Image (cartoon, grey):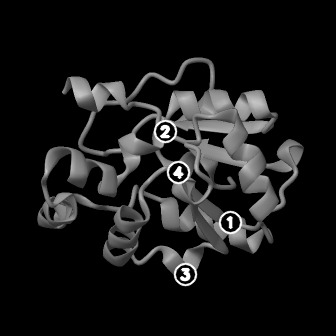
């Protein structure tokens, strides 16, 4: 656990390859064994459809390793709902690092003043705020089997229905 916590907030912490080497375990096989736990949060599909209907560009930007992301997309079928998908590993920095956002912006031009970022990580939201992303929303229940998370001073949702019109 000490090795695990020592990597928190770094790309290694999110890297399947790093942990497979570090722990000499087939991490992807283990992830596949529990893949029945992968689920779409309630009302995410409806929220993405509403954003699309408003003409919004929708990108999934994650710290997840590309192998983990591939498994999640295979299990959820969400891939077609996004215009673009990026992993922090492509940019060499985790989303917690303010430099990440500039690298993302080079690949996916966006206006920080007009961008909405929804995330379940307070360090990521802090980094995005420092970069200047204006519209930040914290997810209080990223795992529906777990209790609500603290969200500091961020606008927060427990269910994506809270972001739907009406």
Percent of width and height locating residue 137: 63, 38
Q: Which residue is found at the position 81% from the left and 58% from the top? A: 106
Among the two numbered marks 4 and 2 on one chain, the one whose residue lies closer to the N terminus: 2
Mark 1 crowd level (few <14, some 14–19, many ≥20, 10 Å Cα): some
CB contact under 8 Å: marks 4 and 3: no
How far is mark 4 from mark 2, CA to CA? 12 Å
For mark 2, what is the residue?
120
Numbered circle sitting on residue 139: none
* The N terminus lies in quadrant: top left
Q: Nearer the viewer, mark 4 or mark 2?
A: 2
How far is mark 1 from mark 2, CA to CA? 17 Å
Mark 4 crowd level (few <14, some 14–19, many ≥20, 10 Å Cα): some
In front of the other: 78 or 94: 94
How far is mark 4 from mark 1, CA to CA? 15 Å
Q: Is residue 99 above or below residue 54?
A: above
Which secondary structure, mark 3?
helix
Q: Nearer the viewer, mark 4 or mark 1?
A: 1
CB contact under 8 Å: marks 4 and 2: no
Numbered circle sitting on residue 80: 3
Residue 90 appears in which quarter of the rendering?
bottom right
Percent of width and height locating residue 85: 59, 68
Q: Is residue 110 above or below residue 56?
A: above
Mark 2 crowd level (few <14, some 14–19, many ≥20, 10 Å Cα): some
In front of the other: 77 or 34: 34
For mark 1, what is the residue?
58
Among the two numbered marks 4 and 1 on one chain, the one whose residue lies closer to the N terminus: 1
Among the two numbered marks 1 and 2 on one chain, the one whose residue lies closer to the N terminus: 1
Q: Which residue is found at the position 75% from the left and 27% from the top? A: 130
CB contact under 8 Å: marks 3 and 1: no
Which secondary structure, mark 1?
loop
Among the two numbered marks 3 and 1 on one chain, the one whose residue lies closer to the N terminus: 1
Q: Is residue 23 above or below residue 37?
A: above
């Amino acid at each position: 656990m000490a090795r695990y916590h020592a990597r928190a907030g770094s790309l290694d912490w999110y890297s399947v390859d790093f942990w497979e080497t570090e722990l000499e375990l087939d991490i992807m096989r283990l992830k596949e064994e529990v893949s029945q736990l992968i689920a779409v949060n309630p009302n995410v599909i409806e929220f993405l459809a509403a954003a699309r209907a408003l003409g919004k560009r929708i990108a999934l930007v994650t710290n997840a390793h590309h192998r983990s992301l591939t498994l999640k997309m295979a299990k959820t079928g969400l891939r077609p709902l996004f215009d673009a998908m990026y992993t922090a590993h492509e940019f060499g920095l985790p989303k917690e690092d303010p430099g990440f956002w500039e690298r993302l912006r080079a690949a996916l031009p966006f206006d920080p003043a007009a961008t909405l970022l929804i995330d379940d990580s307070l360090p990521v939201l802090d980094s995005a705020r420092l970069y200047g992303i204006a519209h930040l929303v914290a997810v209080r229940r990223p795992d529906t089997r777990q209790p609500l998370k603290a969200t500091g001073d961020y606008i927060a949702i427990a269910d994506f229905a809270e972001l739907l019109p009406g």
